[in-house]
Amino acid sequence: AYSPDGIRWTAESRNPLIPFGDTQSVPLWDPQRRSYLGFVRTGPPNIRGIARIESRDFVHWSPKVTIFKPGEDKLDQPFRSVPYGMKVLPYAGCFIGLINMYNWETLGPIPKDKLFQDKVNVQMAFSRNGITWNRVGSNGVIPFADLSKDLDWETIARKQVFLQYGKHKKEWDWGQLYAYQAPVVFNDRIWIYYTGLGSRHWSNYHGDDRPPKSGIGLATLRLDGFVSADAPQEGGYLVTPPLLFDGHCLELNIDVSGMGGARVEIQDESGQPISG
């Protein structure tokens, strides 16, 4: 639909324009490709996965291309996690994806030692072009090659959560979190608004409040602070991959409180310091 003022709307005569998807569709403008992108449910049939579509005029859309299939990776198997939708933020020439991840769907009784079941948290994805995407964990991008390896995926999945729901039945957002489209960059902070619910997904089967109590929450984070490299208290070092750089200033985003400070050098491709 179209509106000149955000109040009065006229429906597009050729609706529906986008292949079927029942919830959490996300459109945005890609300034580099000069086209509209949409991140929607995969299907048909309508299943919990994430697909990408593209349009030059917001009317004629490409077929769906699947980005994340539900539960395909070993990363998602420990908690039977499936993507419920993904909000996308164009950021510094790249794209940050906030995946609303649904964990362990169930209608049956939930044991006290498995209170993660039937809840939704927010995880992260990353893309340089909006087409190919990587999952992101506590140590940054998870290489595709690692997703098929036999690793401690339960620990990795626990550490992977970007926005976690609150304490079970003690905080207002204890059951489900859904990030909004899109985060706001303001001064030196990133503001992420989200819906929080004090119930599980199938609340009517689990004896939770009906209708669920809900509200809008705000999570904030330092500029560029989506992931970080952390050193032990006694200090450490980090070497970046080779970078192509044609600017006049490099900025280091680091917190050295309690550690004394940081020293920096620029190296050539062979790892030798460049004089001066």
Image (cartoon, rainbow, N blue to C red):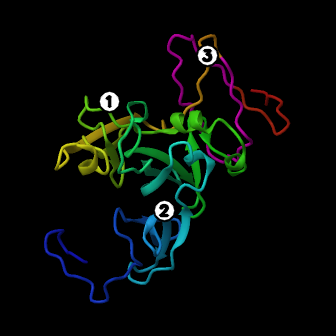
Q: CA distance from mark 3 to mark 2?
A: 38 Å
**Which of the two discs, 3 and 1, sits closer to the camera?**
1
- The residue where tag 3 is placed is 232
Which of pointers 3 and 1 lies earlier in the amino acid sequence?
Answer: 1
**Nearer to me, 148 or 161:** 148
Q: Is residue 197 visible?
A: no
In this picture, residue 231 sits left or right of residue 192: right
Query: Residue 192, percent across and down?
Result: 34, 43
Q: Quadrant of residue 12?
A: bottom left
Q: Amino acid at mark 2?
A: Gly
Above or below: residue 170 compared with residue 25: above
Above or below: residue 28 compared with residue 79: below
Q: Which mark is residue 167?
A: 1
**Which of the two discs, 3 and 2, sits closer to the camera?**
2
**Nearer to me, 75 or 126:** 75
Q: Quadrant of residue 166?
A: top left
Q: Amino acid at mark 3?
A: Pro
Image quarter hosting the C terminus: top right
Q: Residue at x 48, y 36 (%)?
A: 225
Q: CA distance from mark 3 to mark 1?
A: 28 Å
Image quarter hosting the N terminus: bottom left
Query: Residue 247, percent across and down?
Result: 62, 45
Q: CA distance from mark 1 to mark 2?
A: 27 Å
Q: Looking at the image, which residue sits at the far right?
A: 270
Q: Residue at x 85, y 36 (%)?
A: 270
Query: Residue 205, percent across and down?
Result: 27, 49
Helix, strand or loop status at disc 1: loop
Q: Is residue 257 magenta?
A: yes
- The residue where tag 2 is placed is 49
Helix, strand or loop status at disc 3: loop
